[in-house]
Image (cartoon, rainbow, N blue to C red):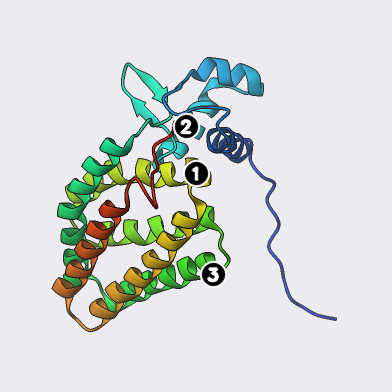
């Protein structure tokens, strides 16, 4: 008889279910871009405490699906083409800096962790699972921000980039083939970044990141974010 031991399977928590349901409502358009989310109202509909809803919204904010503003409440981001272009202007300046710093400071173990994230993103891309891919791709970018060692740079990128990734998913159905092509290009650029980092060339990795972001900005309004009528 096999002596293999298995860990107990934990039941899905209430918070996880609430997060999943709210995310599904945002992606499907039941909760629309720009719409205010009232914690008390949502708690009543779910039949749970308001504290649980607040925890779920904090998690959704981390992934860019909502924006929480002090004294103003929580709402789904409402980003148009001009907003996305302005975000990319900032990313083009800041993200290559983060990649370059990460290349200077990352240990071999940390580079291996980044490489694992590239492998995961590539698997998601090959399965054409856009939702999972963008989660993996964002994880790769967040790892670079973290390894930069500059907490202010990391915080700035987290604040502006996460809502943009969520927007790709919320509006993904508007130009899915364009998104699929973008996914392929994302994987290729991740692999080029890692090739440069493994070779000990952080500035080359930063150059790759900058060129990629500039190309992505040029694709706004066509492949990525067609304006919604």
Q: Are marks 1 and 2 in contact (CB under 8 Å)?
A: no
Residue 181 lies left or right of residue 207; in this view the side is right
Where residue 11 sits: x, y (%)? 70, 46
Discs 3/2, front:
3
Question: Callout 1 environment at 10 Å: few (<14), some (14 to 19), or many (20+)?
Answer: some
Q: Which of pointers 3 and 1 lies earlier in the amino acid sequence? A: 3
Q: Say which element carries label 1.
A: helix
Say which of 210 and 150 sits in front: 210
Q: The residue tagged with tag 2: helix, strand or loop?
A: helix
- Residue at 19% x, 61% y: name it: 96
Residue drawn at (33%, 59%) of the image: 141
Dot placed on the residue nearer the N-terminal end, 3 or 2: 2
Residue linked to disc 3: 126
- From the viewer's side, name the closer residue of 83 and 142: 83
Against 203, residue 63 (above or below) is above
Q: Position of residue 44 (x, y in %)?
A: 62, 16
For label 3, count other residues whose C-alpha is less than 10 Å away and answer few (under 14), some (14-19) or many (20+): some
Quarter of the image for residue 85 reads top left
Foreground tag (1 vs 2): 1
Residue 2 horizontal/vertical position (percent): 80, 80
Question: Residue 213 appears in which quarter of the rendering?
Answer: bottom left
Residue drawn at x 49%, y 27% is 32
Ranked by sequence position, the earlier of labels 1 and 2 is 2
Q: In this image, 13 relative to 151: left or right?
A: right
Residue 76 in view (yes/no):
yes
Q: Which residue is mark 1?
A: 174
Q: Which residue is mark 2?
A: 57
Residue 163 in the image, given as x and y percentages of width and height: 36, 40
In the rendered image, the quadrant that contains the C terminus is top left
SS for dot 3: helix
Instruction: State whether residue 63 appears in this view.
Output: no
Disc 3/disc 1 C-alpha distance (Å): 21 Å
């Amino acid at each position: 008889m096999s002596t293999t031991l298995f860990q107990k399977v934990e039941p899905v928590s209430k918070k996880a279910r609430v997060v999943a349901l709210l995310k599904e409502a945002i992606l499907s358009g039941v909760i629309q871009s720009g719409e205010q989310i009232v914690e008390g109202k949502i708690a009543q509909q779910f039949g749970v405490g308001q504290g649980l809803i607040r925890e779920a919204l904090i998690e959704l904010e981390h992934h860019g699906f909502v924006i929480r503003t002090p004294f103003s409440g929580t709402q789904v981001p409402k980003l148009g083409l001009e907003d996305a272009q302005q975000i990319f202007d900032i990313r083009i300046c800041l993200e290559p800096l983060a990649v370059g710093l990460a290349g200077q400071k990352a240990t071999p173990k940390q580079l291996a962790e980044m490489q694992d994230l590239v492998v995961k993103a590539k698997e998601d891309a090959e399965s054409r699972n856009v939702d999972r891919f963008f989660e993996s791709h964002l994880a790769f970018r967040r790892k670079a921000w973290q390894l930069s060692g500059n907490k202010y740079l990391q915080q700035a990128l987290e604040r502006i980039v996460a809502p943009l990734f969520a927007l790709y998913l919320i509006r993904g159905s508007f130009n899915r083939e364009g998104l699929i092509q973008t996914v392929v290009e994302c994987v290729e650029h991740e692999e080029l970044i890692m090739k440069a980092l493994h070779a000990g060339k952080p500035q080359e990795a930063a150059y790759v990141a900058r060129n990629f972001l500039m190309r992505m900005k040029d694709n706004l309004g066509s492949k990525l974010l067609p304006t919604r009528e």
